[in-house]
Amino acid sequence: MPSPVPYDPQYVADAKPVIRPQKAGVTTRKTICQTCDIACSVVTESKKGRVVKVRSSDNPIFRDNICMKGIVAPKAFAHPDRILHPLKRVGERGSGKWERVSWDEAMADIGQRLKAIIAEHGPEAWAVSTSQWNTATDHGLGRRIMNHIGSPNWISGVALCAGNTAAVNRFTYGWFPMGDFNNTKCIVLMGHNPRRHSWTPMFNFIRSAQARGAKLIMMDPRRSSNAEAADIWLPLKAGSDAAMLFGWLKVIFDEKLYDKKFVKNWTIGFDELKARVDEYPLERVAELTGCDPEMIAKSARLYATEGPAIIPWTPITDMQRNSTSAIRLQGILRAVCGYLDVPGGETLQGFHPDVVPESTIEMHEKLAEEQKAKQLGSDTHPAFTYRGQAAFREPMKRVWGHEYPNQITGCYMANPSATFRAMAGEGQYPVKAFFTLGNNTVLSYANMPLIIKAMMNQDLVVAYEHHMTPTAQLADYVLPGDSWLERPWLTDAFGWMSSYRPSEKSMEPPGEALSTFEFWKRLSNALDRPEIVPWHDLESFYDERLKGSGMTFHELAQETEMFFDKPVFRKYEKTGFATPSGKVELKSSVLEDLGFDPLPYFREDPAGDAEYPLRMFTGVREDAFFQTSQRQVPEMRKRSPEPYLFVSPATAKANSLVQDEWVEVENDTGKISIKVAIKDSMPDGLVRIPHGWWKPEMKQGAGHLSGALKFSDAQLCRDDDDYLDREQGIPHLKGVPCRINKLASAESASLAAGISVTT
């Protein structure tokens, strides 16, 4: 789940960094924090070759963009339990028995075993799952190797977070836009709640926009911190995003608040869309969302008349059974109100002409059409697969100059649930080799029991990691990854922006930790295909990508903190949009050709179940952690030592709950143990489950997984048809039925006594 920081290029050009006196014995480097996915520009201070401090940037536009996770990074990466050498499993899978081996030994065996699997089952029997956090991007090299070898089965957590949004946005106007926070007059947050220590730059941008008079509309069932700061708060029911946006469009169409000229000249399907919108009068929308119809109308008018406005990306809408329709409705609102590719609106940035993008590095054209057709899940849920994106190849080439632009790495993925079923022996063909890079796969997708079964059924599992995560505990090889302090980086926010930011290497990696570049280069050699990754090292790879700029990576890093061209707006007036029609498709021709409803729609929740009277939403991260990481860091665990269930006072009373007691949350997928926190900010009947909980200090191995089997929310996340988005096949995590069970006093006491934070 990556996100760019939408800095105004002219502001960047005019900004004057503070010149600090150099401290004796201290070396500083301008770098980019990758502890989470927002990539804050920071400064590292090193003594005797080791980073001892991470602080805010000296550049005024980046200053204050730092959080507790970035500040504590030097200690986190120096943790005594960090994996520093390749480890090979010597007992049964999940036994927790390992021996240290060399990189050469590990890669030789991995290469031989992977080649044998491919020879027996075909290249599609190899699947890879990656992430964008501490191990950073794989530079497009993972896809490059897979495309040359012949496997289409790449998955990532971005399937539920930004990557799927990038792919779905294309069905409307052919690109994934970035809001112009610096000039916008209205911001709409849909459930996303940036805070001082979570998405810090976005928090700062929102507060700055409000300080200069921009309006803020917040949609969230909770009374969040941004809800309290908003001009309008819409406490909609969890998972009803699409219904709310239908209500907005109903008001905007009925009151003719849309941009009539843009709609006439640059859209298709308006009449059909309007007929669909007419199915959602405000009374119905109010019933579906639980919000007052007058407030729905007031907020719609504010968005339409106080623009240019932006609807920033939100992970909340990515994780719903109506995700595709809700994302499409966001795009439709941007378009019909005239907010596309204008100052203060939603910018369509494309590629920088002087830098080779990772999309080119990936070489999707090398993957045969026969192999693309085998991509798991593409037959039933094609939206972000090769099949779903095929119709955009010509429009992308026409408008953006690239046939396979892979924004947020999420536009040519296999479906995760289908991939795990194939790994478990339940798919259309077997998957027998699985590589996971910085992903902690077991905790990162829906249906955790299926994922564990899938991993136990593999012939080869390779994990590239910092720590012995629950996922790594089920691997055959665990390979040590470097950190963002220990490598250079060149980022364009994973294809979301046309500006590039360089990050300097601050220190050498400890032990035998290597970068993903080195991992993929060594794998290409082990597969007897060294020509796939021909570059000598990471900096020479960056140098080649930067040739068009006339600078080496080192020169770029010394000269600037951001490399960009002056923005150009309304580019569609010359190129059209990157859709088959060249226009904004309010009625999607691509979805229609794939056999889906070409117009957005809203599926109401399945019938209630008396066994599970409450609704839960999951996916929320505590400020101290990002995804499933940092739980081994004492400073972070002191802030959040245990997972907490948030409930309203009325829900607590109805279920006889007491603050800080241990309880069990259960549904028909699984159950977890969790402590109670009674919060006035929570609505009645809805409970909050935090994401990614495990405890590194607890027993490792199969049957334990360091507490993941007891605490991880993935055990409650369903992936059956009723709770999957139809077009994408991603799970509904915002309103799943559940119940709260009281625990026997002995079990509750045992949980309370079992708290033991690693120090």
Image: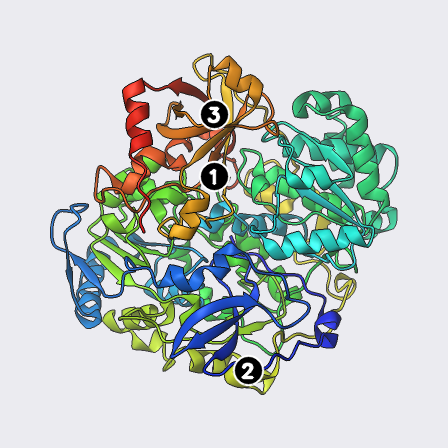
Task: Determine contact: label 3, label 1, CB under 8 Å.
Answer: no
Q: Residue at x 54, y 35 (%)?
A: 320
Dot 1 alpha-carbon crowd within 10 angstroms: few under 14, some 14 to 19, many 20 or more: many
Mark 3 surroundings: few (<14), some (14-19) or many (≥20) residues within 10 A:
some
In-image side of 695 versus 43 (left or right): left
Nearer the camera: disc 3 or disc 1: 3
Closer to the chain start, of discs 2 and 3, is 2
Could you tell me which secondary element the residue under label 3 belongs to? loop
| Residue indicated by mark 3 | 659
- In this view, the residue in front, 618 or 601, is 618
Q: Are marks 2 and 3 in contact (CB under 8 Å)?
A: no
In the figure, is residue 278 to the left or right of 474? Answer: right
Residue at screen point 33% across, 24% down: 748
Give the numbered dot on residue 22. Answer: 2
> Which residue occupies the foreground of this view, 675 or 389?
675
* Element assignment for label 1: loop
